[in-house]
Structure formats: C-alpha cells, structure tokens
Amino acid sequence: MKIMKFGGTSVGKPQRMHEVARLITTDREEKIVVLSAVSGTTNALVAISQQLATGDRAEARRLIDALEEQYRAFVPELVQTDAARAKAGAILDEHFDFLQIILRISWSEALNKDILAQGELLSTKLFSTCLDEQGIRHALLPALDFMRIDAHEEPQVDVIRELLSAQLRAHEGTPLFVTQGFICRNARGEVDNLKRGGSDYSASLIAAAIRADVCEIWTDISGMHNNDPRVVDRTVPIEQLSFDEAAELAYFGAKILHPASIWPAQQYNIPVRLLNTMEPAAAGTLIAQEAAAPGAKAIAAKDGITAVNIKSSRMLLAYGFLRRVFEVFEKHRTSIDMITTSEVAVSVTIDNASALAQIQDELAALGTVSVDGGQTIISIVGHEIASDASLLHRIFQCLEGVEIRMVSYGGSLHNISLLVAADKKKEVLQRLNKGVFDL
C-alpha cells in the first residue's frame, strides 16, 4: 500500500483538488491519501482562537465570517451537480456552525485544539465529496478514530497500527482511503494535534503503522534542493538522500519536510519520496536507508536562533558542571541545537526563547551569563562530510571575512554547522553555494 500526503497548497484551490484526484487514480495500487488543511485555513483558525483567547469576540466573529465566505466561494468551483453542492454546503454548515457556537464558550487550550482541527476536517470532507461526484470509489477514515499520542505528546505507533488496521478491515476491498493529517487524540481522548507541519508526520506514522511500500510527500516544489531557492538563485534538486541526511536537513531548516516525519519511516525502513503536485512527472527526491553517494548534498538555514553563553572560572576541572547547565534547559523543556566549550566557558544555541528569562536567572548561579539573539544556524549536510578535510577548507575559504560565532564539527559525520548573524544569512548561503557546489 502507498501513502500519499498532499500539503495545503496542493489542495488550496478547487482545480488543485481536481489535480490531486487525478494523481491518486493514475494507478490501481491501494493507497491512503493524507490531506492538510486548505492553504491559509490553519493561519485563519489560529487568528480566530487568539482573538477568543483575548476576549475580542467581535473580531473573532469577523474572521469566522471571512473564512466562511472563502469556503462558500470554493464549493461551486469544486463540484458541479446539485447533489454534490448540497452535500458540500451541509459540510460547511456543520463546521461553521461549530465556529459560531464557540463564540459563546470560554476559551481553553482544549477548545483551541478543536478549533485548529476544523481545517483538516473541512478539506478531507470536501475532497471526499469531489471524489464521490466523479464516481471514484473510496472511504473517508477519520484520523481521530486511530491517530493517538501519549501523555508526553509522543505518537503511539502500536496503538495507531491496531486502530487503523481495524478501520481498513472494515472497508475490505476498498482501493482508496482519505484521511486527515495533523490531527489526533491525546491520552485523555481529547482532540489534539501533531503541531505545525504535522501532516508530514501523520503520513510517516501511517506508513510505519501499516508497513507501507512508500510514503509520498507531495508539495509545490520538485523535491529537496541543494540550497534555499527563495534566497539563492541557482539551486538544483537532489536525486537521493539517506534518512540521516534528510533528518539533518529537516531539523536544520529545510522547509519542504517536517523534522519529525523522518524517524517513523526510518525506523521501519519505508522509502519517502518528495514530489511536486504542479509537476508530477518530475523525479523529485528519494529518501532511503542508503546515501546515493558521499559528499555534500545540501545547505539549510535555521532562523530564530539565540546563543546563550555561560562563563565561569569554576568550570576548570569541575565535574558535573555541564550536567548542571543541561539540567536548567531540561527543566524548562528547551532543546539545545549547538554547543561549544572551553575550559572557562560554554555556549549553546536554542530555537525557543520562551523560557529564556527563567533560564538566564538559573544559569546565573553557575557563572556570568550573556545572550546573543538574532542568529542563524547554517548547516552543510552530506554523507560522511565531516571526514572530508578538503570540504572544510573550501567552506572556510569561501566565507573569509564573515564572522562565524560558533562551529559544530564532528558531532555528526553528516553535518557541519555554523552560527552566524541572521543578517548574514543570504550572503553566507550564496557564498557556500559557490564554494561547496560551484553554482
């Protein structure tokens, strides 16, 4: 069985949904189609929830009405028959009635999760209606019936497998299934989600749960490129990456793939293909167990980085100092990306500064603390590149004159990372594109 995930831009317009319907029926292979919300919907729902949280119900109502107007205009282009339009209209009534009802309910985090779930519920139900009109045999599988996370917000693959397998058996002989990405139920049975980018994660988890033959991630770009095409003019698509290479790129800023979506596929050795809905004939990128070849494959940039520096003469030969530093970050559930140490100082980077004030206060007991905001991590990723001395030479040669705040080298064979000021990001990416790839 094949898993095919389509992102928000792939279903963002009626004609795009029609194209998805064509793509998923080009062969007779059994498949599960995972859909994101229509592009722009999740942002609109976040804004509605935020207005409710601040008590501005009038603004929340205005945003709900504006979103409903967009969907009311969407339906006539999506389906043509009176029966299909009536069914689609009833779907809109159901979900926008819910959004109107919440205007009279006190905001809570649980309600917020219910609000955010409406996007995927709408897109899949409307897409199912479109398939029905075209006579395409399929079944709509509610993700809330099988997608589960535990009390630590970790997916329960074994539970997902058990519940999803029961759903598939109930529709034995059905060649095509449609389900929602992103949404799930938590340990309390409440509606929850897999966080932003979670539709990729959903697809990978489903692929792992049913041991799919392949997991296809369809977006609006032809696979992963060797650099950020929004910043660098000359980029090329990558034919094949290993899971390790892809995981490094996803974590360090490659926007085409959600970082969490790699491990389920990797754990069960399920190939992942990154494909383009707008150019379905393009080869895209294959992510598999083995790297296609050694050497640098791509460069990624992770923005919004803060460097935290702790200096203390007491560090010298002090057992347990780093443990105490890490415990502060662990206490505040803040992950560390990069770390460098000397005999009297340690510097780390974080991408979540929400608990920075508390972290600084607690680290002050260990030494002098300083913070540098507005940083970017630039990562050069490729198979065993840390053992390539000539590559390291080329990297620093092409960046001569650029202030590099930190370097991470040797922690991973597949990654060399540099910390630079955010306003140097474009220059660094362009220089590296020339120095590393000669583009």
Image (cartoon, rainbow, N blue to C red):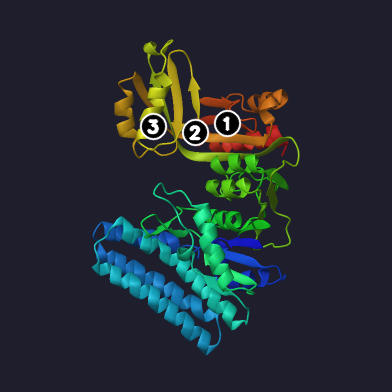
Q: Estimate the x, y position of residue 312 in percent, counting from the top left.
A: 37, 15
Q: Which residue is mark 2?
A: 337
In this rendering, the answer to whether 411 lies above or below 174 is above
Instruction: Check if mark 1's residue and mark 3's residue have beta carbons within 8 Å.
Output: no
Q: Nearer the viewer, mark 2 or mark 3?
A: 3
The answer to which of marks 1 and 3 sits earlier in the sequence is: 3
Give the image quarter of residue 361: top left
Which residue is at a point 59% across and 47% down the rendered structure image? 262
Residue located beneath label 1 in the image: 417
The x and y percentages for residue 108 are: 28, 58
In the visual, does 60 lie left or right of 117?
left
Residue identifier under label 3: 329
Classify mark 1: helix, strand or loop: strand
Inter-mark Cα distance, 1 to 3:
21 Å
Identified by mark 1, the residue type is: Ser
Q: Which residue is rendered at x = 59% and y = 42% of the image?
A: 247
